[in-house]
Image (cartoon, rainbow, N blue to C red):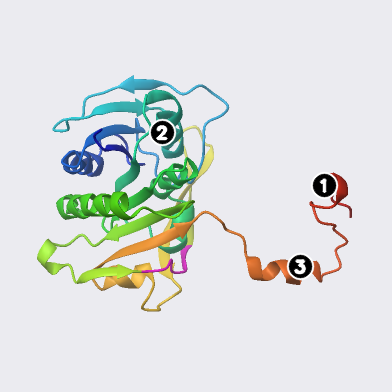
Amino acid sequence: MAVRILVTNDDGILADGIRVLAAELATLGEVVVVAPDRERSATGHAITVLRPLRVEKVTIPGVNAEAWAVDGTPSDCVKLAVEALLERRPDVVVSGINRGPNLGTDVLYSGTVSAAVEGAICGLPSMALSIAAFENCNYEFSAKFGARMVSKVLEKGLPPDTLLNINVPSVDEEDIAGVAITRLGARKWKDVFDRRVDPRGRTYYWMAGDVVDCDEDEDTDAVAIRNNLVSITPIHLDLTRYDLIDELKKWGIGVTSSHSPGGRHTI
């Protein structure tokens, strides 16, 4: 049975990145595209529960694959594909190619990464693929590298609840300095809110800002990208800070374990 690859993104189903990626992945097996019908960047892991989701079959120029456009978030797309649209579960989920990097703490905002997170939640090996540029993006090398990683993941597998976050410099292939296995660096946004007034006299705010990298260690994803290295970061879904559990128990809060008789907390 042919390998089935589910492809999604947050830039929208007709974005250049997903088109180039899907065409490249079709050399490995059967590609199915389920992606938002418009750009859904920075939606994080939002899912749609207060209205129905509408789905439309579409044709992506130059791509030989079944494709559905969904009027929801990237996470919706993966949930819907796995649980409703596909008669057979995919073997791997690939989200991208995102226009712009997803580095450090940006992964918490990213719709691209969140789609891969949803794939991991569904028990599927998953990866997010981004190109570290917003203009003049060289999607071709990123797509080739993504296909190479899909082959590796299918061969080696991934641990449960784990995904790969991959960022690729937007340079010619001969200028790629190598591949770095990295950790998420610390980065923050210096937000700027531009206050404006619409034609009806109502005030609104447009959010912008600049990113600030707070972690310059060589093993971080942001530093790897600056050095023209492809960054691969394994991400695990368990956000628990285990070394703080015993410390919190010493705070004298008066909370009993949820594993106590009756399973109740008492304060």
Q: How many residues crowd around disc 2 within 10 Å: few (fewer than 14), some, or many (20 or more)?
A: many
Residue topped by disc 1: 263
Q: Amino acid at mark 2?
A: Cys
251 sits left or right of 196 in the view: right
Residue range corresponding to the magenta coloring: 182-189
121 sits left or right of 129 in the view: right
* Label 2: which secondary element: helix
Residue 155 lies, in percent from the top left, at 29, 52
* Label 3: which secondary element: helix
Q: Amino acid at mark 3?
A: Leu
Quarter assignment of residue 177: bottom left
* Label 1: which secondary element: helix
Q: Main secondary structure of the magenta part?
A: loop
Q: Which residue is depicted at the point 47% across and 69% down?
A: 186
Q: CA distance from mark 3 to mark 2?
A: 38 Å
Answer whether residue 183 is magenta in the image: yes
Q: How many residues crowd around disc 1 within 10 Å: few (fewer than 14), some, or many (20 or more)?
A: few
Q: Which residue is depicted at the point 49% across and 51% down?
A: 161
Q: Which residue is depicted at the point 43% across and 42% down?
A: 119
Residue 30 lies, in percent from the top left, at 23, 34
Quarter assignment of residue 239: bottom right
Instruction: Give above or below for 159 relative to 220.
Output: above
Q: How many residues crowd around disc 3 within 10 Å: few (fewer than 14), some, or many (20 or more)?
A: few
Residue topped by disc 2: 77
Answer whether residue 58 is magenta in the image: no
- Of the residues tagged 1 and 2, which is closer to the observer? 1
Instruction: Give above or below for 213 relative to 159.
Output: below
